[in-house]
Image (cartoon, coloured by chain):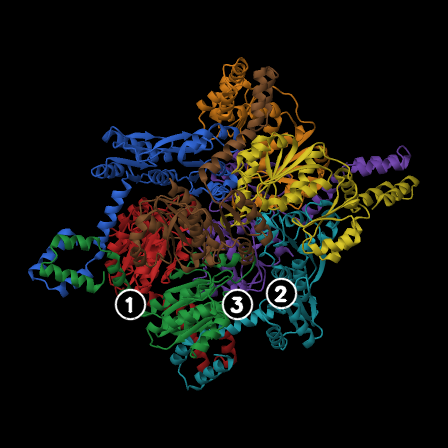
Chain colours: A purple, B cyan, C yellow, D orange, E brown, F blue, G green, H red
Amino acid sequence: MDSDQLRGLLERVRSGDVDVDAAIDRLRHLPFEDLGYAKLDHHRSLRHGITEVVFGKGKTAEQIGAIAARLLEKSRNLLITRADPAAAAALKAKFPETEYFPLSGAARIWRDRTMNGKGKLAVVCAGTSDIPVAEEAQVTAEIMGNEVEAIHDIGIAGIHRLIAHSERLMEARVVVVVAGMEGALPSAVGGMVSVPVVAVPTSVGYGASFNGLAALLGMLNSCASNVAVVNIDNGFGAGYVASLINRL
Amino acid sequence: MDSDQLRGLLERVRSGDVDVDAAIDRLRHLPFEDLGYAKLDHHRSLRHGITEVVFGKGKTAEQIGAIAARLLEKSRNLLITRADPAAAAALKAKFPETEYFPLSGAARIWRDRTMNGKGKLAVVCAGTSDIPVAEEAQVTAEIMGNEVEAIHDIGIAGIHRLIAHSERLMEARVVVVVAGMEGALPSAVGGMVSVPVVAVPTSVGYGASFNGLAALLGMLNSCASNVAVVNIDNGFGAGYVASLINRL
Amino acid sequence: MDSDQLRGLLERVRSGDVDVDAAIDRLRHLPFEDLGYAKLDHHRSLRHGITEVVFGKGKTAEQIGAIAARLLEKSRNLLITRADPAAAAALKAKFPETEYFPLSGAARIWRDRTMNGKGKLAVVCAGTSDIPVAEEAQVTAEIMGNEVEAIHDIGIAGIHRLIAHSERLMEARVVVVVAGMEGALPSAVGGMVSVPVVAVPTSVGYGASFNGLAALLGMLNSCASNVAVVNIDNGFGAGYVASLINRL
Amino acid sequence: MDSDQLRGLLERVRSGDVDVDAAIDRLRHLPFEDLGYAKLDHHRSLRHGITEVVFGKGKTAEQIGAIAARLLEKSRNLLITRADPAAAAALKAKFPETEYFPLSGAARIWRDRTMNGKGKLAVVCAGTSDIPVAEEAQVTAEIMGNEVEAIHDIGIAGIHRLIAHSERLMEARVVVVVAGMEGALPSAVGGMVSVPVVAVPTSVGYGASFNGLAALLGMLNSCASNVAVVNIDNGFGAGYVASLINRL
Amino acid sequence: MDSDQLRGLLERVRSGDVDVDAAIDRLRHLPFEDLGYAKLDHHRSLRHGITEVVFGKGKTAEQIGAIAARLLEKSRNLLITRADPAAAAALKAKFPETEYFPLSGAARIWRDRTMNGKGKLAVVCAGTSDIPVAEEAQVTAEIMGNEVEAIHDIGIAGIHRLIAHSERLMEARVVVVVAGMEGALPSAVGGMVSVPVVAVPTSVGYGASFNGLAALLGMLNSCASNVAVVNIDNGFGAGYVASLINRL
Amino acid sequence: MDSDQLRGLLERVRSGDVDVDAAIDRLRHLPFEDLGYAKLDHHRSLRHGITEVVFGKGKTAEQIGAIAARLLEKSRNLLITRADPAAAAALKAKFPETEYFPLSGAARIWRDRTMNGKGKLAVVCAGTSDIPVAEEAQVTAEIMGNEVEAIHDIGIAGIHRLIAHSERLMEARVVVVVAGMEGALPSAVGGMVSVPVVAVPTSVGYGASFNGLAALLGMLNSCASNVAVVNIDNGFGAGYVASLINRL
Amino acid sequence: MDSDQLRGLLERVRSGDVDVDAAIDRLRHLPFEDLGYAKLDHHRSLRHGITEVVFGKGKTAEQIGAIAARLLEKSRNLLITRADPAAAAALKAKFPETEYFPLSGAARIWRDRTMNGKGKLAVVCAGTSDIPVAEEAQVTAEIMGNEVEAIHDIGIAGIHRLIAHSERLMEARVVVVVAGMEGALPSAVGGMVSVPVVAVPTSVGYGASFNGLAALLGMLNSCASNVAVVNIDNGFGAGYVASLINRL
Amino acid sequence: MDSDQLRGLLERVRSGDVDVDAAIDRLRHLPFEDLGYAKLDHHRSLRHGITEVVFGKGKTAEQIGAIAARLLEKSRNLLITRADPAAAAALKAKFPETEYFPLSGAARIWRDRTMNGKGKLAVVCAGTSDIPVAEEAQVTAEIMGNEVEAIHDIGIAGIHRLIAHSERLMEARVVVVVAGMEGALPSAVGGMVSVPVVAVPTSVGYGASFNGLAALLGMLNSCASNVAVVNIDNGFGAGYVASLINRL
């Protein structure tokens, strides 16, 4: 029941065509969720102000193209994660402003470049193999309107490199820390800064890293209290939640 | 090498008692960490403005009493988590303003009640058995200077109860969601609000809950992108990181 | 906004005191969930016709007594699972018709003994150590209005005993199968009957049973296609879902 | 020993050709299982009235064709799960009425379209990536004689979409719910309907979804009591057991 | 339907009181399992010639006494595993010949001391902490009629001790090897002897032994091909299966 | 130090060229292991009387050919497990009597066909997908000198099929049972026979079978006491240990 | 066959009482392991020069007293790990020089205080809860003849504290690092020093620490290449292996 | 702030251009880490004297070539682990002295062949399939300046082969032991030698080896106290840490 239908019903109540009991019954049994849908949805789009996001994995270049075209009718910005080069090429053919980030597979159409973040958002990663996940976080945070400070390759076994970047880290309003292997970097960064740290374990490693489980458990057990964790390799999620934090 | 020593050295440089090369050598080999310690520490205390926190588990009433006395010399607020009733009683005898929360075992001396949070911080839990963890999150958030909106017992299997609280949830600036069993509540809340959600799995459940593992995995795999997760039963950590977010 | 409020609003629309636009606005912004709550809740109580259920574990005798008293005002039947003997005694003192089943800890006040199930509901268990969980399933199914056929101690290593009960099994409309250790009984029963089988792994066993994990995995991988599984030791859940099936 | 042999033996008892002791011995030592086999088997085919089912994975197009031809001699309906396109093409060449569902790999020859289900059977899935498993459940349920209501893409993070379908869900006699990631949808649906819910975890997800383990554990720990679970990605099993339920 | 009933039926066939069709029907629908039950059961008792066994854990002294009395009516030997001292004392009061082994909790009434084993059965354990499980294996094997050679405390880290016992090991017809921690002893013994080795992992160890999981996995992955494994701490099962082997 | 060297030393003792103390010293410090090697090795070859075995996986056709040629100089029989078709073809070109079993990848040169087993050795498997592993067990047992009774496709969900084979099972002196999915067949067979059962879990299954873990745990927790278990998919190991048992 | 027997045999060879062939035969069949035992054992005691060690857990005060008395006859030093206070008191009554360390339960009789270590051995731990394990490592290293530098409470989240101790760390010849929770400290220390690091995960933590698993996996995946790991809570093992390293 | 800047500052202090307070402030806020970086780094290169190491996996031949060229400007030795043949060929074209080890994928440019190790470093492996990991350890240890004693194929099930090598093992100053499957070899070697043993589990095995987990757990639970463990398949790490030990 949309607005027009509701108006029609109420007008018929006013005119006496429908009596109050029938209207109550009608309203009670109306698919109330339609109302709810509109309401919730309105709130979401209003508050989030968010770029549309498509998970590209498992979708064909054609499918991604079609979805992109549809979404770009109502949104100025579009982020596609885990897109393969073919999908990216097809997208670029259709929308020439498409940027493609082959390490992470992120593709981005970024027309509305309003800054929503109130400060710097740092994205730190431990090793060069973690860069794809860090890149996904950065690309996400940027299109959601953040100035991103990217700091790569500062592992826990080289504390001096971490300290060398301490000033830049301390300037950030929220920090995304990406690490595989033992996943210790978020603890070290968390002990250094006084802002929220969003930790992303990566599946980088071998043997007893168990595809990121070691890093995940390490981060969940962080001795730094300002660390919260997202799923293994979930650079997008980290960039997203950090963006929400930086908008506050 | 503290400030005074450094000043002494530099004055001897100025007076010519120490030549430049010797000073460089001295500075190069000084335990640079002292400098760093002071610096970092200063930053931490300055920025965090945080209540001192003691993990009470495994400490005797006497130990807790002694630690509390020492910490309260330099901090106005003190939070002790997982304290048993005996420790709480001993603390109360010493510091009559001690509040004790027996469900979670949190004990609190809350003298400086400045509000640091810029908005409401909601703490939601799924079932009555999750209340102890939610309480720990609430007590933590309050002493860190937040107005906390506590909403209990709104499980995912009773969506209408969740919807009934949607307005209150939408007013929060950050939401802590505590849930055991399947740990699905953060996803539902995350889909409803547009602010960061800090999810806390609890060890509530039996059988294949594996002491909170089911809830933990559920939350890490949340289909809502605004969810970040802390350790199982870590109400304190959730309250802490949510407080940092709400201070931004 | 309850019925009365809605009626008031509509009557004011009819009388012209409230114009249509204001009413639309009011309706659009009313806490729609109240409507939903009532609606859903009504449906639930109507359709389920279910005994109230309380999870007794971790609740004191006093708490259980108070909850029971409150629930029995609106429901004729009450089931308390995992109640300890003290709670059961207190309950019996208050409600003399209380039945207590010490193996499973189920306590039951069963006043309305209407049969809702359309046929027999069999509850089978593999070993004597599985009986507590089977008992919980049986007590649940009975109070939900089923005639229960209980068959104990027919393990997979004594196929002749299983066959000896085949006639009774084949007469059931739905079968709950409870087993620990390797959890193979549901497969054997599932191959014998042509009705749904609800399998309950138990934590009975030691060593590599890993508190029921072996039985759980066994049941999930059943080569019989008519088997669905509930949580380890969840006799209540099995009795509940089997009761819903038997009511169809 | 089949009927004819048994008759022959008894007639020889009657005629005196075989004395009673010899007959007892013969009967006692006859492979009693033949009797049992016939009996049990008769019961199975009688009661199940079921389509023959072939697990296509790992079988060549030729093998599937041969098996199909043999089974279709005694059964009007045939379902092949997890068949690859080549096998499906070969099947279609032989049996032109073959339907093929490439997402799930199900192939179906559906000649006897008797409705065995007594009501609607809903198949719900959380995300588009879960559709292949949902499709397998639907194809299975249909060929087993059910009217299937398919509802796709109603995740827990978009509760309004779930509510929008609540009426359709409430009309079903049994609901299959398919979900990957955190596997929370069955709890939400289970709280909404009052009929049995058969939950299927899918291996959709990455990182800490551990190929469906997170969804599986979530479903086993559902706070809704009307949920029973089948193996990860087991759309067929869910459709099968739901069909048995809907036939009751 | 026992022998007498069957004889009666056949005699009525012979006398013409029952016609062939009725007899066929009767036989076809007789609870065939009774026949099977007798048959299978006879085979079991005949072939196994086995001591009755009771799992004592979780049974009261009274229950064990009652079960023992009943079983000793039809069996000369009785083994009770995991009995506590109280149960053993009660048993001894009733059956003075009861032997009790407090390390393993095994209690034994051993009247028929026929040797069934055709050779020596060795029971080897790695450390003193493994002795309880080894003792359970030994007590089981003895009461099942085997001469047991017990060799304790020959760990893999002291190869010389293992070699020192090589002669005794090589004389055994079957070897039970009990080990916790890394569970490597069965491989070493298996490489030394040319007879079957039954390996029992124990829950001895700490940390990453994970209650015997490390030992279990070690044994399952043994590089010696003559090793088969039973459950963690399952001394009884090892003694049992080794006894069956030694009887061949 | 081989026999000749030892003889030389002793002759020099006798001749007086080496005095007793020097000889003692020499003997004490001689690499005693050489002695041990011979001794142990002699025992092994003597007692095992075993076919040489090569694990073919990861070896090239050339490598396998070379190893085979070398081993066949001292052994009449040779078994190669997990050989790919190319290796088998190369082997056949060299040794025309090579038999190849493509399901399991076993290749066999079986010249000495002495029967070492004292009775029948049954190899049973649950489903058609388990046949490769069962075949490996059978091929192993045959070349080690056993008459093998192969029984395929008797799952636990079709008990009548199991019973139909009970006579054949009861005739075996040792039974290998191969099963994937829930791994319940060994329990059922174990309850039927009174001889040792060697259980082999297979990696057949999907989802929560976790590549054979479910079957493995099921077998380790078997309620039948005559079951011992080998590694997942280890048909060779099962055939080997069963052969050793059957030789006793 | 000990030295005297061997001498006797050789003298009879020399005298001609035993001919060479008989002696060869005798030597070949002598229980060669006796020789080996002596040899290996001699090497061990010679090279290790090690304190005797007793694992006290699960032993009574009387047992420990008896073992201690026996061992102290041949060794000047004795270490008992995981002894309870009662055992320690009994030991002290018997051997007044007994030192007891109640945190770790280590008891020590340290008479021969020779320094075997060639440099300092540092024992570092992350948090106060890790001290018991660190203490066990220290007590072990000391009695094995090392000067131990103990540094407590330098977690990874407070890098400045770690740096503050860098000089002391860099002076050590081998470092034991003890840490629970995320187990990141060994990586940080390993990156700082250029000597071997022996890492000990502790079971300190809760929730997803899974009793030390998180720390264990973290340490195994350390990005510092100079880290090797011992079992969870195995302070003794770390102290032992570090002592062996420091003796080189 | 490098040396020159520091000198400049101090000279301005001396000249009076900068007063003491300003200099303190400047020093206090200077990025102190630069100082630290130099210091630590100097220590590392000084003490380690180590070959540069590149993890080749996931890098292209071009990338590896470029990195190698850059590193060889400041280091005489270079080790690349896990390089594929193409990368090795490209490297060889550029640096003809490149050695390539195809089993492990190690590539080595070894110009400075100074021996840093003070004794022999033994690398032992259990089976032929473990050789690639052992080779990586050996290649690493050699380029770090050690004389390596390589002993292959001495499994725990053939103790005589282990004993045959005992003399060579006892001569080593540190032993690396590489083993898959049950991972028992380090315990056996550890019991034989009195020096540190660095254990490397390999992913060799199948089924319940779980890609090396069984071997890893076995080694962590070793009953020999002189064993420390590195990650699964981490031959490089073992060679590295053993080299550091051998340099002491």
The mark closer to the camera, 2 or 1, is 1
- Whether residue D135 can be seen here: no
Place of residue D177 in the rendered image (x, y in percent of width and height, measured from the top left): 63, 37
Give the labeled residue for mark 2.
B82
Mark 3 vs 1: CB contact within 8 A:
no
Res. G47 mark: 1
Name the amino acid type tagged 3.
Answer: Ser
Asked if marks 3 and 1 fall on the same chain, the answer is yes
Place of residue C187 in the rendered image (x, y in percent of width and height, measured from the top left): 55, 35
Name the amino acid type tagged 2.
Answer: Arg
For residue G72, side relative to residue E101 (left or right): left
Binning the other alpha carbons within 10 Å of mark 3 as few (below 14), some (14 to 19) or many (20 upward) gives some
Res. C45 mark: none
Name the amino acid type tagged 1.
Answer: Arg
Q: Residue at x 26, y 52 (%)?
A: H160
Name the subunit of mark 2.
B
Place of residue G167 in the rendered image (x, y in percent of width and height, measured from the top left): 41, 73
For residue D211, side relative to residue F236 (left or right): right
Dot 1: element: helix
Judging depth in this view, the residue of G191 and H219 nearest the camera is H219
Mark 2 vs 1: CB contact within 8 A:
no
Give the labeled residue for mark 3.
G129
Name the subunit of mark 1.
G
For residue A227, side relative to residue G69 (left or right): right
